[in-house]
Amino acid sequence: MDNDCNQYIFELLPNIKYRFNESGLKPFVLLAIGVNIYWIDGSVEISNELSFAPQAGAGMEFDLENNLYLFIQAKYAVVFPNGNRIMHAVSSYVPVQAGLGFNL
Protein backbone atom coordinates (compact mmCIF):
# COMPACT_ATOMS: atom_id res chain seq x y z
CA MET A 1 0.00 0.00 0.00
CA ASP A 2 1.41 3.42 -0.85
CA ASN A 3 1.58 6.35 1.59
CA ASP A 4 -1.06 8.41 -0.24
CA CYS A 5 -4.16 7.08 1.51
CA ASN A 6 -6.91 8.03 3.97
CA GLN A 7 -7.55 6.05 7.15
CA TYR A 8 -10.91 6.18 8.91
CA ILE A 9 -11.96 4.75 12.29
CA PHE A 10 -15.56 4.39 13.48
CA GLU A 11 -16.24 3.23 17.06
CA LEU A 12 -19.54 1.65 18.06
CA LEU A 13 -19.15 1.34 21.85
CA PRO A 14 -22.24 1.47 24.07
CA ASN A 15 -21.32 2.60 27.61
CA ILE A 16 -22.58 1.42 30.98
CA LYS A 17 -21.96 4.12 33.58
CA TYR A 18 -22.32 3.98 37.39
CA ARG A 19 -22.51 7.35 39.19
CA PHE A 20 -21.58 7.45 42.89
CA ASN A 21 -23.66 10.60 43.68
CA GLU A 22 -27.00 11.81 42.37
CA SER A 23 -26.36 15.59 42.38
CA GLY A 24 -23.56 18.14 42.32
CA LEU A 25 -20.13 16.68 41.60
CA LYS A 26 -20.58 13.04 40.51
CA PRO A 27 -17.66 10.64 40.17
CA PHE A 28 -18.37 7.65 37.92
CA VAL A 29 -16.92 4.48 36.46
CA LEU A 30 -17.80 3.13 33.03
CA LEU A 31 -17.51 0.04 30.91
CA ALA A 32 -17.86 -0.02 27.12
CA ILE A 33 -17.97 -3.09 24.92
CA GLY A 34 -18.26 -2.85 21.17
CA VAL A 35 -16.38 -2.76 17.91
CA ASN A 36 -14.00 -0.52 16.01
CA ILE A 37 -14.39 -0.40 12.24
CA TYR A 38 -11.26 0.61 10.32
CA TRP A 39 -10.94 1.28 6.66
CA ILE A 40 -8.18 2.59 4.44
CA ASP A 41 -8.91 4.17 1.09
CA GLY A 42 -5.72 4.24 -0.99
CA SER A 43 -5.11 5.03 -4.59
CA VAL A 44 -4.89 1.33 -5.47
CA GLU A 45 -6.97 -0.58 -2.93
CA ILE A 46 -9.63 -0.29 -0.24
CA SER A 47 -9.27 -2.35 2.97
CA ASN A 48 -11.56 -2.63 5.96
CA GLU A 49 -11.58 -4.44 9.30
CA LEU A 50 -13.91 -4.98 12.25
CA SER A 51 -12.21 -5.38 15.66
CA PHE A 52 -13.52 -6.19 19.17
CA ALA A 53 -12.79 -3.21 21.47
CA PRO A 54 -13.59 -3.24 25.22
CA GLN A 55 -12.95 -0.12 27.33
CA ALA A 56 -13.02 0.71 31.07
CA GLY A 57 -12.66 4.12 32.65
CA ALA A 58 -13.58 6.70 35.25
CA GLY A 59 -14.46 10.36 35.38
CA MET A 60 -16.38 13.21 36.98
CA GLU A 61 -19.58 15.04 36.08
CA PHE A 62 -20.69 18.44 37.33
CA ASP A 63 -24.37 19.41 37.08
CA LEU A 64 -25.31 22.62 35.26
CA GLU A 65 -28.81 23.90 34.45
CA ASN A 66 -31.73 21.53 33.76
CA ASN A 67 -30.37 18.26 32.34
CA LEU A 68 -26.94 19.58 31.26
CA TYR A 69 -23.61 18.58 32.81
CA LEU A 70 -19.89 19.03 32.23
CA PHE A 71 -17.72 15.91 32.24
CA ILE A 72 -14.14 14.74 32.10
CA GLN A 73 -13.22 11.09 31.70
CA ALA A 74 -10.33 8.78 30.89
CA LYS A 75 -10.64 5.26 29.52
CA TYR A 76 -8.28 2.38 28.94
CA ALA A 77 -9.11 0.91 25.54
CA VAL A 78 -7.91 -2.38 24.05
CA VAL A 79 -8.41 -3.36 20.41
CA PHE A 80 -8.26 -7.03 19.41
CA PRO A 81 -7.73 -7.34 15.65
CA ASN A 82 -9.44 -10.04 13.64
CA GLY A 83 -6.32 -10.87 11.62
CA ASN A 84 -6.86 -8.78 8.50
CA ARG A 85 -4.24 -6.54 6.92
CA ILE A 86 -4.90 -3.23 8.71
CA MET A 87 -4.17 -4.23 12.32
CA HIS A 88 -1.86 -7.13 13.05
CA ALA A 89 -1.45 -7.00 16.85
CA VAL A 90 -3.45 -6.18 19.94
CA SER A 91 -3.17 -2.46 20.67
CA SER A 92 -4.25 -0.19 23.51
CA TYR A 93 -4.65 3.52 24.11
CA VAL A 94 -5.91 5.93 26.81
CA PRO A 95 -8.29 8.62 25.50
CA VAL A 96 -8.97 11.57 27.82
CA GLN A 97 -12.20 13.36 26.98
CA ALA A 98 -14.04 16.44 28.27
CA GLY A 99 -17.28 17.98 27.17
CA LEU A 100 -20.88 18.87 27.70
CA GLY A 101 -23.52 16.17 28.11
CA PHE A 102 -27.23 15.95 28.71
CA ASN A 103 -29.58 13.46 30.39
CA LEU A 104 -32.53 12.17 28.42
Image: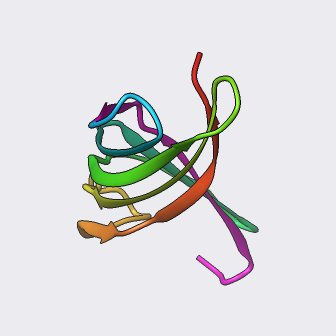
* Pick the front one: 29 or 6: 29
Q: x and y percent of residue 54 in the render?
A: 27, 46
At horizontal 47% and vertical 66% (from top left) the residue drawn is: 96
- Residue 9 within the segment the image draws in magenta: yes
At horizontal 68% and vertical 23% (from top left) the residue drawn is: 66
* Pick the front one: 99 or 65: 65
At horizontal 47% and vertical 39% (from top left) the residue drawn is: 24
Display coloring: rainbow
* Pick the front one: 5 or 62: 62
User: Is 89 left or right of 47, judged from the image as shown?
Assistant: left
The boundaries of the magenta stretch are: 1-19
Q: Is residue 47 above or below residue 2?
A: above
Q: Is residue 49 above or below residue 33?
A: below
Q: x and y percent of residue 60 in the render?
A: 42, 51
Quadrant containing the C terminus in the rendered view = top right
Which residue, as the protein is rendered here, is positioned at the far front? 24
Q: x and y percent of residue 8 in the render?
A: 63, 57
User: Is 53 left or right of 43, judged from the image as shown?
Assistant: left
* Pick the front one: 103 or 21: 21
Q: x and y percent of residue 1 in the render?
A: 58, 76
Q: Is residue 3 above or below residue 79?
A: below
At horizontal 45% and vertical 65% (from top left) the residue drawn is: 95
- Residue 54 within the segment the image draws in magenta: no
How many numbered dots are placed on residues in this image?
0
Residue 26: quadrant of the picture: top left
Which residue, as the protein is rendered here, is positioned at the far top? 104
Q: Main secondary structure of the magenta part?
A: strand
Residue 20: quadrant of the picture: top left
